[in-house]
Amino acid sequence: MPRADLSLTRAELNAFRRGLNTPAKIQYFLDHIPYNIEADGDTFRSPRRVLRDRTANCIEGAVLAAAALRVGGDPPLIMDLTAVRDEDHVIAVFRRQGLWGAIGTSKFTGLRYREPVYRTLRELAMSYFEHYYNLAGERTLRGHGRPVNLARFDRLHWMTSEDDLWPIAEHLERIPHRALLTPAAGRQLTRLDARLKAAGLLHHPTAGPGRAPRPPARARRRD
């Protein structure tokens, strides 16, 4: 691990090396901490703060996953998924035997883990398409950015910083993105099936069963 990130404490290293040492274990951790809706999700905690606070929104969860993958010997890669009439979503991506998988957290059930079975990043991104929708029931996923190696942000001490990591989010927004649909295909999409929508909202912290929907958060990434 680069010297820039040797500021991890022994307890933090043990947490990564023992409890978060496989993609499945990282996903399990994210699935069992509360989703961060603090200040409408307008925070960007470092992995140190996520481990301490035991909460994460989507970009915080992706960066925590990237840090855990890095400690385990993988490059710390995150990727942005872009949408229309909706918020973006960020996932950590990894490869096993040349195939792509992903780790993520979301208020929406289907926008989390992907097994490493996808030959290309486009295939991986498209696996989120049917599960990526807004509360109006519109399918909203439209593109993805290239994977960003967080080693480029070591100067920010992104694994351990007490400051929010907004320069990473701003970089994700600036880089080129590839379209997944043509405009014509996007105009022909049907409304979401009510059963799929209900399944996706099963554990949604504000629009799930028994909760009244509220206006979309102003978070920079998809909640």
Image (spheres, rainbow, N blue to C red):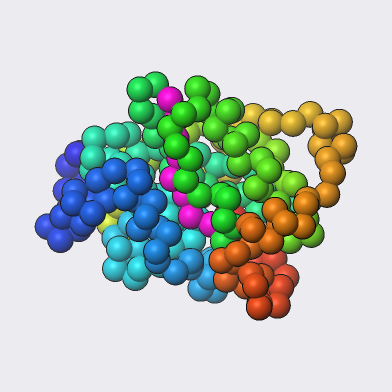
Task: Give x and y (percent) for residue 24.
Answer: 35, 46
Q: How many marks?
A: 0
Looking at the rendered image, the quarter that the C terminus falls into is bottom right
Q: Nearer the viewer, residue 95 or 149?
A: 95
Q: Nearer the viewer, residue 172 or 22?
A: 22
Q: Residue at x 61, y 41 (%)?
A: 128
Q: Label the magenta part by its dominant secondary structure.
A: strand
Q: Residue at x 35, y 22 (%)?
A: 97
Q: Residue at x 87, y 37 (%)?
A: 188
In the rendered structure, the answer to whether residue 111 lies left or right of residue 186 reads left
Task: Give x and y (percent) for residue 105.
Answer: 48, 55
Task: Give x and y (percent) for residue 48.
Answer: 29, 60
Q: Is residue 30 above or below residue 40?
A: above
Q: Is residue 61 above or below residue 53?
A: above
Q: Toward which corner of the image does residue 52 lie, by quadrant?
A: bottom left
Q: Nearer the viewer, residue 89 or 192?
A: 192
Asked if one can make out residue 218 in the rendered structure from this viewpoint, the answer is no
In the rendered structure, the answer to whether residue 23 lies left or right of residue 180 reads left
Looking at the rendered image, the quarter that the N terminus falls into is top left
Task: Give x and y (percent) for residue 3.
Answer: 17, 42
Q: Which residues are magenta?
A: 99-106
